[in-house]
Image: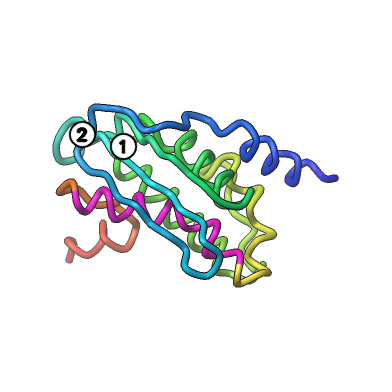
Amino acid sequence: MDLYQELILEHAKRPHAAGLREPFEAEVHHVNPTCGDEVTVRVHVTGDGQEARLADVSYDALGCSISVASASMMAQEITGESLEQAGRAYAAIRSMLTSKGADPGDEDVIGDAVALAGVSKYPARVKCALLGWMALEDALAQSGHGLRTPTTASEGTT
């Protein structure tokens, strides 16, 4: 078993920061209809504007090793980060997972989630790996904040 497989299994067996916590501004529940994986994500944002940070990202994930591990990796990587950094991580993981193997991922941006790079070769599993991240995006939108991805950051500039 290679290091990446071990990392995915470790996150799946012992998810980091699992459990729903308070306080939170928004809670979103997503289900992958293809396989039945489920995730509930809560976000707690502090500060405003450029100072806005994800003070806490809590989640409850039920499903395959990939979806649970990805939610664990997400919470570990972006809790405490600025919305801009969280947006960069979201854009990087999405690019990696939808690249069909062409984008190996950037460990400096997505941390342990780089272990999910091989999932991109299996389209049915990409939804599993993105489930928690999509719920995060929706929870932030529901809270009145949004992920500041490189695309959305440049939309306001001329």
Task: Give the tally of numbered discs.
Answer: 2
Could you give the CA–CA distance between mark 1 and mark 2, rounded to whole angstroms?
7 Å
Up-down relation of residue 108 to residue 153 (above or below):
above
Which element type, helix, strand or loop, lies under badge 1?
loop
Disc 2, SS:
helix
Identify the residue at horizontal 36%, vertical 44% (top origin). 41
Q: Residue at x 66, y 69 (%)?
A: 122
- Residue designated by label 2: 51
Task: Give the main secondary structure of the magenta stretch.
Answer: helix
Q: Quadrant of residue 83?
A: top left
Q: Quadrant of residue 56?
A: top left
Residue kind at label 1, given as amino acid type: Ser
Q: Which residue is mark 1?
A: 82
Asked whether the beta carbons under mark 1 and mark 2 sit within 8 Å of each other, the answer is yes
Which residue is rendered at x = 60% and y = 70% of the image? 124
- Report the amino acid beneath label 2: Glu
Q: Would you call the spot at circle 1 few (<14 residues within 10 Å), some (14-19), or many (20 or more)?
A: many
What is the x, y in percent for residue 7?
A: 69, 39
> In which image quadrant can residue 84 be found?
top left
Q: Residues within 10 Å of mark 2 (few under 14, many from 20)?
A: few
Q: Residue at x 23, y 28 (%)?
A: 23
Q: Position of residue 139 (x, y in %)?
A: 27, 49
Start-end of magenta stretch: 125-142
